[in-house]
Image (cartoon, rainbow, N blue to C red):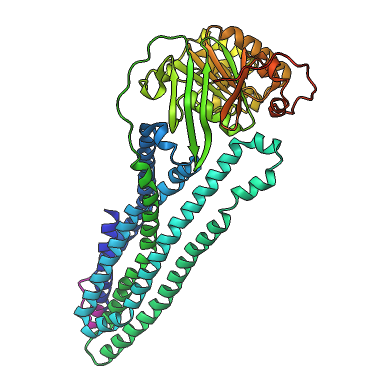
Amino acid sequence: MAVAASTTATLLLPALLARAVNQALAGTGSVTGRQLVALLVLLTVAEAAAQYAAPRSGADAAAHIRALAVRRTLAAGPAAVARMPVGDLVARLTASAPQAALAAPALVYSAAQLLMAVVAIVALTLLSPLLSVAFLATAPTGYAVIRRQLRRTTDAGDGYQRAQARLASGLLDALGGSRSIAASATVTREIERVLRPLPQLSRRGRELWDTQRRTAWCTGLLAPATQLTVLAVAGTQVAAGRLGVGDLLAALGYTGIGLSGLGTAQSLLDVAQARAGAARLTDVLTLPLPDAVSRPLPAGPGRLELRGVVVRRQGVVALDGLDLTVPDGSWTALVGASDSATSLVAALAVGLTAPDEGTVALDGVPLTAIHPDDLPTAVACAFADPVLTGATVQDALGLGPEPPPPARLRGAARAAQADTFIRRLPDGYRTPMSSLVLSGGERQRLGLARAIARDSRLIVLDDATCGLDGATEAAALHALRAETRGRTVLHITRRATVAAAADRVAWLHEGRVRTVAAHDELLSLAAYRDVLDGGIPGPRPAPAKAAVHD
């Protein structure tokens, strides 16, 4: 509505001004100052409303597109999403969605500007056909320039977003395996790998700016040339007595309005960027949905089984025929040189991703077949860098569809060695999360408390104690063993103290479980000692031979 009102007022203004001038020179007048003021007020209000409505509608559209993409991503499940690198998916949701949202306001402005250009040409023709001929002799050159630049903008925008996605994916991969990178002294090599798409990103970005610069330069040069041509023709018409002075003013006004069609350059450039963003989002919005077949999870002790699991990431085999059984009621540590591979096992165990081949089952039921409402209550997890969501500390600890009672939350916090520092907060468990500044270790302890507070049969800890000092970690592990007695725990770690506290250790090597044995038995193997943080010097006494997992 604002754009329509602004367009109407803009088209009426030159005619009203011309009429007022002609009547003033003739000594007659029916056009009053009030009419001009009213039209100018309408134009000002409409322009202001349009300037507010355009970004607001774009923001609303971006939020709607993001919501659709997130819902589709969640509905598609881990199997479908695993085909797309995490960094690429994040880039599509954060960068491509706002670009796709430019389409609606850009199309509205483009349509309004083109309509004004057509009406302006008609008005020039009504004043004098020679005026429209003069206009059309110069203006179409600008439209040809715009058309050529649009194709370049679409290609450059798509290339820019793809390079941005590769850069984000590489960075997330490096962050996920930061400890392995540091241990293997390959920081420089990883920096080079992550930044490899940077030259293409820079080149594509320069191409985008270059197309906008060329378009602005060409249209900026063409506008005064067109105005001078039309004014020259209008001047000859006034001198010949065919047009009045007011008509000359109208010709100048309609020439400027007609040139507003060249203003579609920026709007159409926005449309081109929106097309590139929409093309990137199409892959997300068309992710295949899994079969709706699911069944309730029967009661069970929490036995976790991975059989023949193969996972590929970006064409590379991360897990290759992995077989692992975590007995019910046991505490099993998973140790491996690759942080990304061990974290991938944790993600498989809690259903955050799905294998390309093989099965992951809880109490004999494949995770992919479990009803979505049952899995969050049966499985709990804690991570090295937990995301704490909730209005207060208590809300963050009880996050979920059915929060545990406060007494259970406090017991879990005590076991995770978090109760003491929580009680020291200004409002204790009622302290707003927004006012907290927590250390990495404090965040981990809250994440541990949240994981064990639920009555989950399987708990997966993905390096969830790596930020704790030795004494705190030892106290937490001792309390956690008591708190989780009877439940199954899979603890991803590279700390010797954590591995020693476990009932058994599964050693992940080159995508497979090489050995499952007690920590003390595995210490006889130099390769195993090298995997642990800081390594453990040999020699060691030769204990009984470790059993090879089949």
Quarter-wise, where is residue 516 in the image?
Answer: top right
Residue 235 rendering spot, x and y as whole percentages: 31, 88
Q: Nearer the viewer, residue 509 or 360?
A: 509
Q: Nearer the viewer, residue 240 or 448?
A: 448
- Quadrant in which the C terminus is drawn: top right
Residue 412 rendering spot, x and y as whole percentages: 56, 12
Bounds of the magenta segment: 22-31
Q: Is residue 401 visible?
A: no
Q: Nearer the viewer, residue 11 or 89?
A: 89
Q: What residue is rendered at 70% in x and 18% in y?
A: 497
Q: What residue is rendered at 63% in x and 9% in y?
A: 479
Residue 490 rendering spot, x and y as whole percentages: 56, 18
Q: Is residue 90 left or right of residue 227?
A: right
Q: What residue is rendered at 60% in x and 40% in y?
A: 174
Q: Is residue 306 left or right of residue 286?
A: right
| Relative height, residue 91 to residue 427 (above, below) | below
Q: What residue is rendered at 28% in x and 70% in y?
A: 117
